[in-house]
Amino acid sequence: MSEESYIKLTKEAMSKAYVPYSNYPVGALIITDKGNQYTGCNVENASYPLGNCAEASAIASMVMGGENKINKIYVMTRNDEGGIPCGGCRQRIREFSDESTEVIMCSPDGIKDRIHLSKLLPQSFGPEHL
Ligand code: THU
């Protein structure tokens, strides 16, 4: 699939976001090492801390699909900088990453930046430390 179609899928995921409190929709698309796709959106709650990030819901979907290796993750928001994963989501992505895992920050009109997870979360803690 082309990068253009990945952007389209990420935008579709963002359009599903349930964000009555922040009005800040986020969509995420994971491409696994096997080339499969899993999407997620943020889902908020009247009890604010219970909301889920888009990356977390895409990861849950990937795990339900029986996979655990993120090759690339697209994150989209409506601003011009593109979707930047929060600290918690950097750690969530880290769990299923290796040195080549890329985070691709997008806005609805396309890709704004791409960066390796290891640069977003340097000297990180992971399963191999346990
Ligand atoms: N949000 C995400 O979905 N992913 C991130 O990495 C950053 C924040 C969501 C959480 C909340 O629903 C809204 O964006 C505003 O923080």
Image: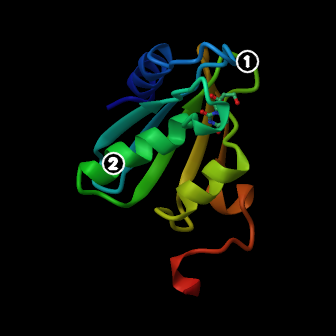
What residue is drawn where x is 53% and y is 29%? 42
Query: Quarter containing ligand 1?
Result: top right
What residue is drawn where x is 50% and y is 19%? 17
- Relative placement, left or right, of 118 versus 32 is right
Q: Are marks 1 and 2 in contact (CB under 8 Å)?
A: no
**Camera-side residue: 16 or 2?**
16
Q: Quadrant of the C terminus?
A: bottom right
User: Which residue position holds label 2?
Assistant: 62
Identify whether 123 is placed above or below 69: below
Q: Position of residue 75 (x, y in %)?
A: 57, 33
Identify whether 122 is placed above or below 30: below
Q: Position of residue 104 (x, y in %)?
A: 59, 39
The residues tagged by marks 1 and 2 sit, at their Cα atoms, a distance apart of: 26 Å
- Relative placement, left or right, of 38 versus 119 is left
- Disc 2 element: helix
- Relative placement, left or right, of 27 versus 77 is left
Q: Position of residue 21 (x, y in %)?
A: 66, 17
**Camera-side residue: 93 or 33?**
93
Other residues around mark 2 within 10 Å, as few (<14) / some (14–19) / many (≥20) = many
Q: Hey, which quadrant is residue 124 in on the image?
A: bottom right
What residue is drawn where x is 66% and y is 13%? 23
Other residues around mark 1 within 10 Å, as few (<14) / some (14–19) / many (≥20) = few
**Camera-side residue: 69 or 65?**
65
What residue is drawn where x is 51% and y is 65%? 95
Q: Give the mark nearest the N terminus, 1 or 2.
A: 2
Q: Amino acid at mark 2?
A: Met
Residue that extends furthest to the bottom in the rendered view of this protein: 130
Residue 116 seen in the figure: no
Q: Which mark is residue 79?
A: 1
Q: Amino acid at mark 1?
A: Asn
Q: Position of residue 101 (x, y in %)?
A: 53, 57
